[in-house]
Image (cartoon, rainbow, N blue to C red):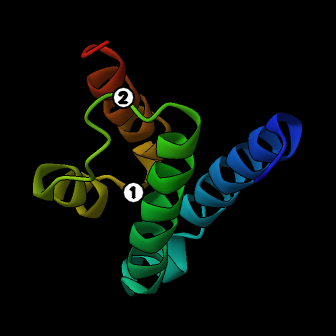
């Protein structure tokens, strides 16, 4: 099992990767980064579930659509997913 500090570092690294990918304008236009970002968001959700198993951590079709429409707004999307999950506690 991951230690708490390792787990937090993995979460931080995952979020940093998403933000970095969102800045790759040329690749975002070609949709290459969007596909990668979807998978990284799914990994982020898996990591969040490990640290806080209660809540609705689903990456919905609506979330996916929002990612495709506004990839640069990834921090907002992660916040929406997190607040939705935390509101069920």
54 up-or-down from 49: above or below:
above
Q: Residue 45, how many percent across, how many down?
A: 45, 50
- Residue assigned mark 1: 71
Task: Quote the CA–CA distance across marks 1 and 2.
Answer: 27 Å
Q: Residues within 10 Å of mark 1 (few under 14, many from 20)?
A: many
Q: How crowded is mark 2: few (under 14 residues within 10 Å), some or many (20 or more)?
A: few
Q: Residue 60, how many percent across, how many down?
A: 17, 53
Q: Residue 36, how many percent across, how many down?
A: 48, 78
Residue drawn at the location 26% of the way across and 64% of the way down: 68
Residue drawn at the location 42% of the way across and 43% of the way down: 73
Q: Which of 28 and 40 is in front in this view?
A: 40
Q: Which residue lies furthest to the left in this view?
A: 62
Instruction: Identify the image quadrant of residue 78.
Output: top left
Residue drawn at the location 36% of the way across and 82% of the way down: 31
Say whether residue 1 is left or right of residue 73: right
- Residue assigned mark 2: 54
Q: Nearer the viewer, residue 23 or 58?
A: 58
Say whether residue 78 is left or right of residue 25: left
Q: Which residue lies furthest to the front in this view?
A: 1
Q: Nearer the viewer, residue 30 or 53?
A: 53
Instruction: Identify the image quadrant of residue 14.
Output: bottom right
């Amino acid at each position: 099992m991951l230690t708490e500090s390792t787990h937090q570092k993995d979460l931080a690294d995952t979020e940093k990767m998403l933000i970095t990918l969102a800045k790759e304008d040329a690749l975002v236009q070609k949709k290459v980064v969007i596909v990668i970002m979807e998978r990284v968001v799914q990994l982020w959700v898996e990591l969040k579930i490990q640290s806080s198993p209660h809540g609705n951590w689903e990456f919905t079709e609506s979330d996916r659509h929002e990612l495709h429409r506004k990839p640069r707004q990834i921090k907002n999307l992660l916040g929406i997913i997190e607040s939705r999950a935390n509101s069920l506690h």
